[in-house]
Amino acid sequence: MNRELQNKAPIMEALEAFKKMRVVPFDVPGHKHGRGNPELTAFLGEQCMMVDVNSMKPLDNLCHPVSVIREAEKLAADAFGSTNAFLMTNGTTSAVQAMILSTCKKEDKIILPRNVHRSVINALILCGAVPVYVNPHTHDRLGIALGMSVSEVEAAIKANPDAVAVLVNNPTYYGICSDLRSITNIAHEHNMLVLVDEAHGTHFYFGKDMPVSAMAADADIASVSMHKSGGSLTQSSFLLTGKRINHNRVRQIINLTQTTSGSYLLMSSLDVSRKNLALNGEHIYSKVVAMADYARNEINKIGDYYAYAGELINGDTIYDFDNTKLSVNTLEIGLAGIEVYDILRDEYDIQTEFGDLANFLAYLSAGDRFRDIERLVSALAEIRRRYKHSKLGMLKQEYISPKVVVAPQQAFYSLNKSLPIRECSGRVCTEFVMCYPPGIPILAPGEEITDDIIEYIIYSKEKGSTLTGTEDPNVEYINVLS
């Protein structure tokens, strides 16, 4: 990385120059620098509305960048150690979709873990590729899905030599990392590309002593959610490509789904955040790790809670751990993670990232403060004192291995009918059922609905999880193959 070059932010600089030009706007957006919508301008601020502008020659065009946006992409590629980088304004969902659509076509096989974000399976529905799942192991105490076992990935590759790619989560939402270098080497030996969903791994590129990043592991393409741990605005991300990928083709694929009206608010936030991390990332993330380590120690001193970290590492399915993740198991106090999540928000005004059946995640980044950690720890101690009871009868399993009956695209577009959830056992699902966040499907199109899955869904509803993905907003009916 060239630190001298990284001091630039070409999109922001072009927008600053644009503001000084006092341009009279006879183009979109219709708010005309905020004058046409005073209430919105008062809410968001004049500075924001002034740079919410349309593509024009001085500001370049996201669909076909040749000047300031292209320069920003080159700086991002330099910062992340990739061959090319693309600014994404439709969220990491669009980056994941572009990653898969760029490498897979109809009936191609792709090897992947089943605990992927719904955007991965959405991409399979769009392109018609066929998943070959390496079902993750589950941690006995925590109930969470783990990383991909190298030996099981290798077995899947040898059993499916016609597969075109392997996809890896790096890390999982909980902070668990697979042995990305070994998986990449094996895949490349068998002429398969390696795709990495790095939505929660931006800091791997800039922090010290972090788990290996996709580009450092020689993966071929990675989606990086800059707005999660990188400080950019929500919905802004990067797509990174390596030397084996035709970046011109990727641009064409991106333009199939990404907006033609790229937001300069989002693009400039990517530009400025990349600059900040390139120059200050090591210091920023050392502070984040220190906060997370302190929080884990204090939470574990309370008793019954388990804030876990690198002690889980086993050299295979937990090859490494992201120490910025503050993942906490709650079962020993007799509460589901989602129940602690709700109590923290409703009674203590503390908003954590998500809660599931056995854990909650507090997402730490550069904007957090030690005094906020103290408030969280104090609240958790009080919750334990007030609410602790027997854990008898509680479910802890966060992941149930699915049985894939038909390909996602075939199931999604097939004739279906809606049945009460209790009547769905043995049927094939044609839609998604998931808790969001984290957005990992409990059921995806083409998978068999079992009694265990039905009980899991009902239990999740009872505990207060936010279930999404079904046509029925109340998740009392599921669409199944006719």
Image (cartoon, rainbow, N blue to C red):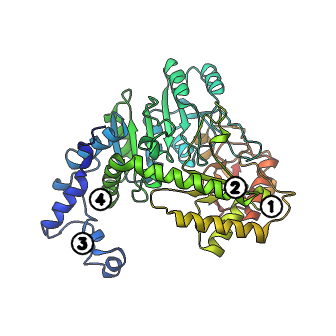
Q: Amino acid at mark 4?
A: Tyr
Graded by Cα atoms within 10 Å as few (under 14), some (14 to 19) or many (20 or more), the crowding at tag 1 reads some
- Visible residue check, residue 176: yes
The residue where tag 3 is placed is 33
| Apparent side of residue 40 relative to residue 213 in the rendered image (left or right) | left
Nearer to us of marks 2 and 3 is 2
Answer with mark 2 or mark 1, whichever residue precedes in sequence: 2
Q: Is residue 69 above or below residue 130?
A: below
Answer with mark 3 or mark 4, whichever residue precedes in sequence: 3
The residue where tag 2 is placed is 300
- Visible residue check, residue 434: no
Residue 264 got which mark?
A: 4
> Label 3 to label 4, Cα distance in Å?
13 Å
Graded by Cα atoms within 10 Å as few (under 14), some (14 to 19) or many (20 or more), the crowding at tag 3 reads many
SS for tag 3?
loop
SS for tag 4?
helix
SS for tag 1?
loop
Residue 443 got which mark?
A: none
Q: Amino acid at mark 2?
A: Asn
Residue 154 falls in image quadrant: top right
